[in-house]
Image (cartoon, grey):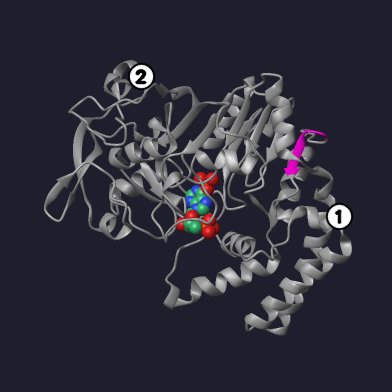
Amino acid sequence: MPVSIVVGLQWGDEGKGKMVDHLAENAVAVARFSGGANAGHTVEVDGKRFALHLLPSGLVRKDVIGMIGSACVMDPVTILEEIRSLEGNGISIEGRLKISGKVNLTHPAYRCLEMQSESDLASGKIGTTGRGIGPTYVRKYKRNAIRLEDVFDMENFTKLVDFHTLDAVNTLNLSSTQVETLHADVKNFIEATKEVSRFSADVSLSISEVLSKDALVIAEGAQGSLLDPDHGSYPFVTCGQCVSGAACTSLGFGPAPVTEVIGILKAYTTRVGAGPFPTELDNQIGQRIRKAGNEFGTTTGRPRRCGWLDGVLAAYSARINGCTSITLTLLDVLSGFDELKICTGYELDGKLIDYFPESVTLLDKCKPVYEELSGWLSLSMQKYPSLSNWNLNSGSASFSAGSILHPVNTVLESGLM
Ligand code: IMO
Ligand code: MG
């Protein structure tokens, strides 16, 4: 009864979608277990590119079942647009999509509330995607959220929706035009929820049925481990759990069937939004990587902050996720550099450390210590043997010149880039 979990090991945008799509070839189901419309997973089918925010990436394959777990948050208007975009391109998802009735819905007012909290200087800017993710999770834990299954009791659903509309209008200083827009958005929200409700399902039960047939389930993560609210660079994180353990809670199965945890690691590092980033290159090299890798947000279009590969961070992420293998992506972006750098340790208060500090205050003070490697002109794995020798010991990065450490089983998938 195998489950393969795919997670991002950095601050998101590692290429998870491409890897999930690749693995989905042998899977019966692909189940998204975290986040909401803040994710941006780009997949290509028959030369057409799809930027998916909520739908599981594997759904572009016509024989795969797509599921969305209960720990995800969902904007019904966005998911409906995605469904229509796939269907408009001849990819029917009817009968293949199962959304947990327990997912919490992003009411349109939450985006307005998020905008206000982001502009409130006292709370400090996180640089969110503006998709209302934080306010949706806040309401989940306040226990007054709107779940997809609520739509099946229309009277109660309308009451809940109205409560959140009114709450926002009372909290925010909205102009009459903004109030009008909000009411129009709420109408769309209600209509979209009704339409999407036909996909509501018991995801835990559906997964157990797939597993009982010994068929493969891919659990697809969103965001990256350093954006996890527990293990990431808090408070500069998202609100849904991004690490592998969250797959079980969100999708409703125990850890026993998990046979693989595949960490996706980009050959360099990017980050969108605020927060510490030890290997950031706020210079021409960073700009060159951004241009070569087209490092602009799929969700917001924001330029991503770029920097060298951070091995200390990678080792930490491999540990908290229990990675059994790592896929290194986007190596081709680094083609043509005379010299490449990989961070193998940090200098913290004059001392060299080789572990990732738990506290973001300490992380902010860390200065990267680099190993330098000669670059390549065009990508060919044979020409770059040092990368096939990458070792991530249980949590601490110990690199030696020319030979980067290696986890249990390093996967180098140049073909996926
Ligand atoms: P994928 O799945 C990159 C970042 C935002 C911000 C922080 C909090 O494409 O890897 P939020 O809107 O979630 O409350 O924002 O998290 N963030 C991402 N960065 N890729 C993502 O998803 C992200 N999802 C959220 O930029 O710093
Ligand atoms: Mg993204």
Q: Quadrant of the N terminus?
A: top right
Quadrant of residue 214 in the image? top right
Q: Where is residue 236, by image quadrant?
A: bottom left
**Looking at the image, do the residues carrying marks 2 and 1 touch, with CB atoms under 8 Å apart?**
no
User: Can you see residue 17?
Assistant: yes
Neighbour class for label 1 at 10 Å: few (<14), some, many (≥20)? few
By secondary structure, the bulk of the magenta-drawn segment is best described as strand
* Residue positioned 49% across, 74% down in the render: 119
Classify mark 1: helix, strand or loop: helix
Query: In the rendered structure, which segment of residues is drawn in magenta?
Result: 95-99
Against 329, residue 240 (above or below) is below
Residue type, mark 2 in image: Met
Q: Is residue 155 left or right of residue 380?
A: right
**Left or right, 71 with reference to 262:** right
Residue 174 seen in render: no
Q: Give the crowd class for mark 2: few <14, some 14-19, many >=20 residues within 10 Å.
A: some
Residue 96 among those drawn in magenta: yes
- Classify residue 133 by image quadrant: bottom right
Q: Residue 262 in magenta?
A: no
Per the model, the C-alpha gap separating discs 2 and 1 is 54 Å
Q: Earlier in the sequence, mark 2 or mark 1?
A: 1
Residue at the image point whose x is 20% and y is 40% from the top: 370
The numbered mark at residue 381 is 2
Q: Position of residue 290 (x, y in %)?
A: 40, 46
The residue that disc 1 covers is 152
Q: Position of residue 263 (x, y in %)?
A: 45, 33
Label 2: which secondary element: helix
Residue type at numbered disc 1: Phe
